[in-house]
Amino acid sequence: MFPIRDHNPSGRVPYVTYALMALNIVIFLWMLPVSGDERALSRLYYDWALLPRRVTQGDGYAGLVTSMFLHAGWLHLAGNMLFLWIFGDNVEDEMGHLKYLAFYLATGALSGLAHVVADPASYIPTVGASGAIAGVMGGYLLLFPKAKVDILLVLIIIFRVFPIPAWIMLMVWFGMQFIGGVGADPTAGGVAYWAHAGGFVAGLVLTVPLWLRLGGPRFWQATDGHPPHAPARYPALPSSIPKVKRK
């Protein structure tokens, strides 16, 4: 189950979201020449990734921010940018450009702190924008719980696309991060589940002041939990995709 888009048009151009996506891509391309050099890559990660042990020793605090602009591979980058593209524009629309940027960086840093708390002795470098993007998803949940999100479900050779309310998709995603964090070996590499869960909770909490200024429960009643800019009817989508071409 993978989100591919939402039915939630924004009211302004999401300049910050686009800039964040561009910056992540540019930095990834800049990293490519050293990606095959283990020694150089290790040095780069030591300087710019998040290393929990360094933070607990009172060093490496910059990694709480710089790590969110590094990625470990094409799929890592593509997945994060897809989620940012789906959910970022609407949160930026409601918050405004500069407040959204501050929100993004804050949730990214807080997600890193959650990861440090979960495994304070780890020397494994942690990279990726997913903690900050999880914060964006937490804010999206509070602001647009009933927005429609198109989900791609792949069952061996069957591809199905169908819309579900955002709150279902986001809560399932959060539940998967929580369960993954409980069951993961903290000494091994892989997915930083607690960074995801921590960023999501941080984004939800930091969005509460905006939600209250919009009216709180009255905002939900006025919009029925749907996006304020969404059209009354959504275009129908095919229930299956029999063939696809990749380019």
Image (cartoon, rainbow, N blue to C red):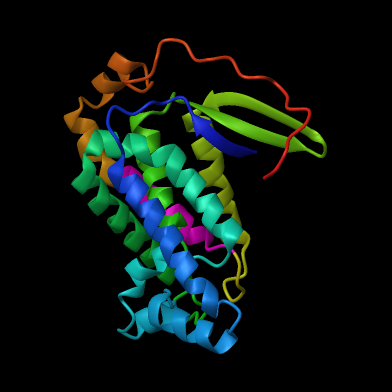
Q: Is residue 71 above or below residue 152?
A: below
Q: Quadrant of the C terminus?
A: top right
Residue drawn 45% across the image and 71% down it: 30
Q: Position of residue 49 (x, y in %)?
A: 43, 75
Q: Nearer the viewer, residue 238 or 177?
A: 238
Residue farthest toward the front in the current orientation of the protein? 247
Residue drawn 34% across the image and 81% down it: 60
Q: Position of residue 72 (x, y in %)?
A: 55, 67
Residue farthest toward the left in the current orientation of the protein? 213
Q: Nearer the viewer, residue 173 or 34?
A: 34
Q: Position of residue 105 (x, y in %)?
A: 30, 57
Residue drawn 34% across the image and 34% down it: 90
Residue farthest toward the right in the current orientation of the protein? 157
Q: Is residue 23 above or below residue 16?
A: below
Residue drawn 40% across the image and 63% down it: 68
Q: Quadrant of the N terminus?
A: top right
Q: Is residue 109 above or below residue 141?
A: below
Looking at the rendering, the stretch of residues picked out in magenta corresponds to 191-205
Q: Position of residue 209 (x, y in %)?
A: 20, 39
**86 magenta-colored:** no
Image quadrant in which you'd find residue 182 = bottom right
> How many marks do you count on the picture?
0
Image quadrant in which you'd find residue 75 = bottom right
**Could you tell me what secondary structure mostly forms the magenta stretch?**
helix
Q: Is residue 201 above or below residue 211?
A: below
Q: Is residue 116 left or right of residue 62?
A: right
Residue farthest toward the top in the current orientation of the protein? 232
Please indicate, yes or no, whether residue 125 appears anywhere in the rendered image.
yes
